Amino acid sequence: MPDRRDKLEADALDELRGQLEQWDIASKESALEQCIYLFVEGESEELAFRILLEEGLGVDFEKLGVVIANYNGIGNLKHTLRLMNLTLSHERPMIFTFDDDNKSLISGLGQQPDNIYLFKVPYSPVVTLPNGDYGGSFEESFEASDFIDALFETTLLKRNPQVYKQQFIDSFDPALPFYDQSVKYLRAQKLQSYLPSKIEIAEHMATECDPEPETYVKLAELIKRIRSENPVQVKI
């Protein structure tokens, strides 16, 4: 009876498909329950990190259970660390990224629990800071050329075509903080507004950079290593 056999095979396939879908749903739910928190400094980083990690480096946030959020400025880092350590989620892995431009503040955080990973941005120091330290911030985690290209794609610069890109390049020093130089230069051009959008710059750099900078390659590796060491326990 081929019709009956075909129906039984179809039913078996449907049941298997249902089991796989259930497993997939359960895996995603379990990953979220056992998430890796990724905390970043601000809105610009929250937008850019997701683009760089998910679209550029193949870090599947849903599959790996990565939850990204910003702590709204380096001044809130210490408070956020303390709060997370007091919550019921205190045993979950947490990555806190921070701009490498305030070494005294970071050193003052002291020893952290094993589930907390502090990750500086950029991964390797790039510029000399006003206080003489060698480090950088989010913008310096990209090539200077990526920053300049992004700067001239902002709404502010597009509305001011009299500001020439090559003239800015000629005045630019890649050994000094990038964004501060752009503000200083635009102020000297007597613009009514001289603060280009950091969010616009971040999105353009994240979308257009090729290849992805070392900082984000290293961060992707850290996320994958943490998940490998803390595999999701699927609950069916």
Image: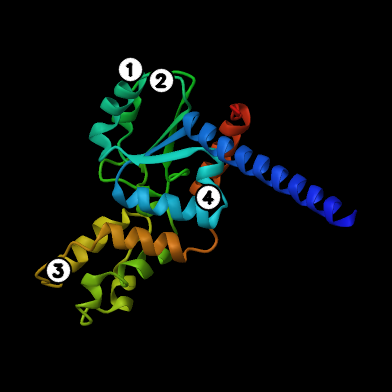
Image: 5 above or below 73: below
Image: 46 above or below 207: above
Between disc 1 and disc 3, the foreground one is 1
- Identified by mark 4, the residue type is Glu
Say what secondary structure mark 1 lies in: helix
- The earlier-in-sequence mark between 4 and 3 is 3
Q: What's the mark number on residue 90?
A: 2
Mark 1 and 2 residues: CB-CB less than 8 Å, in contact?
Answer: yes
- Identified by mark 1, the residue type is Leu
Please rate how many residues cluster around mark 2, counting C-alpha atoms within 10 Å: few if below 14, some from 14 to 19, many from 20. some
Give the residue furthest to the front. Answer: 1
- Identified by mark 2, the residue type is His
Relative depth, front residue between 25 and 212: 25
Q: Residue at x 63, y 37 (%)?
A: 23
Say what secondary structure mark 2 lies in: loop
Relative depth, front residue between 233 and 53: 233
Disc 1: which residue? 86
Q: Residue at x 34, y 24 (%)?
A: 84
Between disc 4 and disc 1, the foreground one is 1
Residue 41 visible (yes or no)? yes
Disc 3: which residue? 188
